[in-house]
Amino acid sequence: MAPQTAALTVRTAEQQSPKGLRAGWVKMPLQHDGRNTEQLLNSVMPRTQTPPQAPQPPLPAVRAHLDWFRRTGATQVSQRYRAGVLRRLAAALPDGVTLLTATRDDLEKWQSDLQVSISTIAGYTSHVRRFYGWCVEHGHLDTDPSLQLPLPRVPGRKPRPVPDEDLAVALQCARHQQGPMRVWLVLAAYMGLRAMEIAGMRRENITAVDGRLYIDGIGKGNKPFRLCVPVDVEPELRPYLIGSTGPIFRTGPGGRPSRPYDVSMQTRDFFRRLGMPYSIHRLRHSFGTAIYAQTRDVLITQDLMRHTNANTTRLYVQTTRVEAVKALDRNGRSLRPSTATRRRPATPSGVTRRAG
C-alpha cells in the first residue's frame, strides 16, 4: 500500500472551477426579520475577484419570496439552492431586464444556454417555475413567463460506489493530511453521513450509551436521526470530541465551523489531488452497497441510509454482474430433469393399457 500511496500523492488533477456564473449581487440591508435571508442572497456561491460593473441588486419580490420559502420549513440547503438559481438567472438576463420583466423568450434562452447536466437543468427549471408561480399568486406578476419552460426528464440514476481499492488509497493518504479529512471520509463511507450531516455535528449531540457512542443530528428534509458509531469508527472520531458543546469540525477561516460546502469542496479537491474523480456523496453509494452486500436486506439498508422510500435506496445499492448471473442460474434450475423416479401417468377410465 505504501508505494502505491506515494505514487498517487504525486499525481495531481487539473483544478477546475465549479460550473455556473459567478456574478454576485450587491449587499442590501433587509427591512424584515427574515433569519439568514441576507446571507442566502449574498453567500450562495463564491464571488469573483472583480465583481460586475453594474451588479443587479435583489428585487424586493425576491427577498419576499425567499423569506416565504424559509417560512414554509424549507431546509437551509434548499433555501441556498433556490437563492443561487435566482441569482444566476438574474445575471444571465439581458442588460436592463430584471427577473420581473423577463419574457418567455428570455427564459427560453436562459434554459437553452445552460451548460450543465440534465438533472441540474431540471432542478434549476423547477425552482424558477416555482418562483414565478409564487409571483403570480402574490400579485407581483399578472402572467407566468415560465409556464412554457420544459421540465427535462431526468434519466434513471445508477449506483456509483467508490471502488474499494481507491477508497483504501484515499484513507491511507488522508492519514498524512492535516485536518479532519480522514474522519470525514470514514463517516461518509462507514456510516453513510452526508456532507451537511458531517458539518452539522456538535459535541453535545454525541453521547455514550451503555459504552457505545451515538450521534444525534438533523438529516435531509430536517429529519432527526440517531446512529450508533461502529466500534472501529470510534477511534477515528474520539480525537475531535473536545469540550462539552460546540461544532465538532472547524475548517473555515479563523476557526469558523465547517459548512456543508466546505466539506463537499474540500473532499472533492482532496480526491482530485489523488487523480480520482469522486465526491464525498459517492461514499454514501459505497456505504449503501456494502451494507446491502452484508445483509441482503433492502429494508435494513433503507433504515441505515435513512431513506423514506426503498426505491431511493436502490439508487445507492450496486449489485455485481456475478450475483445477477448466479440468480439467473438458480432460477433456471427448475428446467433440469428430476432425479427422482417419476410416476407413470394414470390410465384414463375405459382404456386398457397395452403390455410392453
Image (cartoon, rainbow, N blue to C red):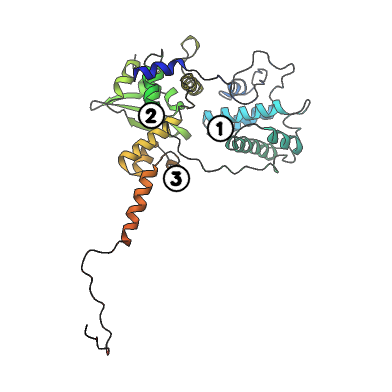
Q: Residue lying farthest top?
A: 254
Give the number of the disc on residue 311.
3
Amino acid type of the residue that numbered disc 1 sits on in the rendered structure: Arg
| C-alpha span from label 2 to label 1 | 34 Å
On the image, numbered disc 1 is attached to which residue?
A: 71
Quick one: label 2 or label 3, which is nearer the N terminus?
2
3D distance between C-alphas at marks 3 and 1 = 30 Å
Q: Give whichever of 10, 34 is nearer the camera.
A: 10
In the rendered view, tell whether residue 193 sits above or below residue 53: below
347 left or right, relative to 270 = left
Q: Nearer the viewer, mark 2 or mark 1?
A: 2
Residue 289 seen in the current view: yes
Whether pointer 2 and pointer 1 mark residues with C-beta atoms closer than 8 Å, the reply is no
> Which tag is nearer the camera, tag 3 or tag 1?
3
Q: Which residue is mark 2?
A: 189
Residue 211 pos. (x, y %) = 23, 25
The front one of 164 and 44 is: 164
Say few, some or many: other residues with alpha carbon within 10 Å of mark 3 (under 14 / 14 to 19 / 20 or more).
few
**Circle 1: element type:** helix
Q: Amino acid at mark 2?
A: Ala
| Res 139 → quadrant | top right
Q: Are marks 2 and 3 in contact (CB under 8 Å)?
A: no
Quarter of the image for residue 234 reads top left
**Of pointers 2 and 1, the one earlier in the residue sequence:** 1
